[in-house]
Amino acid sequence: MRIGRSKNPTGEITLVVLTADDAFEASVRAAFSTSAQIGLAVVKTRLSDRDDIDLDGATVVIADLDAGDDAELEALERIMARADNRPPVVAVARSFEKVVARRLMQMRVADFLVKPVPPVELIRACARVAKDPTDAEASEAQIFTFLPAVGGAGVTTLAVQTAMLLLNSGTRGKATTCLVDLNFQHGACADYLDIEPRLNLSEIEPRPERLDRQLLEVMLSHHPSGLAVVAAPNRPAEMRSFDPDVVTRLLDLVSAHFDFVVFDMPRTWFSWTDSVLLGSNHLFIVSETTVPGLRQARQLVEAIRERLGDGPKPQVIINRFVQKLFSPGLRRRDIEQAIGDAFAACVPNNYALVREAIDRGVPLEEVKPGNQITLQLKKLILPHAAGKIGKEPARAAKKFKLAWARS
């Protein structure tokens, strides 16, 4: 059964709705009835009752499903497999179950809404995902994640400096870049940059579906350099654990609106850690030049490979490395042998330079241009960012990716 029309010269968008719910159909029709640019096609069916729906020509698909019915989820999987993520699919269900959310992430649905859906939220969701597929490469954020193997390895310093490098990597102006501090209890990104942390997850947690671009803007902090920062105020005396769905939704929204995203991860493994690591393009484990540090880095590499399977390959950075010719300490050759094929680089030690940059809340390059730490990070980071450099800055029309678990 063929449904929908291609986007025509007048700019009309074809919205296809698959639902067996009369009330939801009425809500959809009311939401989009005032726009002459939207062609609405409603198919009255449960997903599991039809396997012959051809969505060729549709701009956006809204799939209303019973999330508690495996047959419904399997039917949506078949639709997603046939469509190959085009057109984008917005899934709608009565509840936000964790198991269901993970399956939807693996399917790579464009967005997920919970009934009852306010008309304005439905319109925003469709507007976010309705875009030309030829822009897909340019609109997908490059995600760099830094994970400590040991405490005090300097992860925050490397994450901050990487974000600054990416921010200034564009050839047509600054590339939109966001630094996200995921250490909600002891995060230091805001302190290192001398800015006020504004993220309030407790406000979002009761209703994660209300998190949109406008609310995100309220919770973003901005460094004078132009770097955007997502960071929560420190609560050192509290053990803070948030619903993984809230964290995932926040990070999806961030990745949909920036060219580059850098995550500063806590050492503790939370229920949302797997999803963040799976969604990363580049995963760096940071350790120090000690035997215990190398052992723990190697153990963490093996654990991540076992947990993530075909996910991003972890690479190890040895921070604050000092090479002395006739020293009895560890040499680069020893490090490479201990870490194996996961070894990425050694970042040189310059404590005085880093301390001054932190105290002033500025990049290392502003304190000392051409310093060895920045040069090493450029060699490590910028080749990964080459696909983004030279492209136009990201726009708010980017695809909203619920699919942190990249299939």
Image (tube, rainbow, N blue to C red):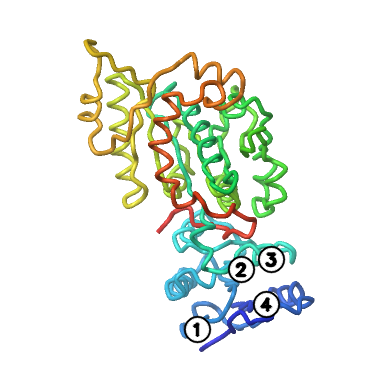
Q: Is residue 62 left or right of residue 349?
A: right
Q: Give the spatial CA distance, label 4 vs label 1.
A: 22 Å
Q: Quadrant of the C terminus?
A: bottom left
Picture coordinates of residue 228 (x, y %)? 63, 39
Q: Secondary structure at mark 3?
A: helix
Residue at horizontal 52%, vertical 80%? Answer: 55
Whichever of callouts 2 and 1 sits on the residue coming sooner in the sequence is: 1
Under mark 2, the amino acid is Ala
Q: Quadrant of residue 121?
A: bottom right
Total tally of numbered discs in the picture: 4
Query: Residues at badges 1 and 3 in contact (C-beta under 8 Å)?
Result: no
Callout 1 environment at 10 Å: few (<14), some (14 to 19), or many (20+)? some
User: CA–CA distance between discs 2 and 4?
Assistant: 12 Å
Residue type (three-letter) at the residue carrying disc 3: Leu
Say what secondary structure mark 2 lies in.
loop
The residue where tag 3 is placed is 122
Question: Looking at the rendered structure, which numbered label has been put on residue 11?
Answer: 4
Give the numbered dot on residue 54.
1
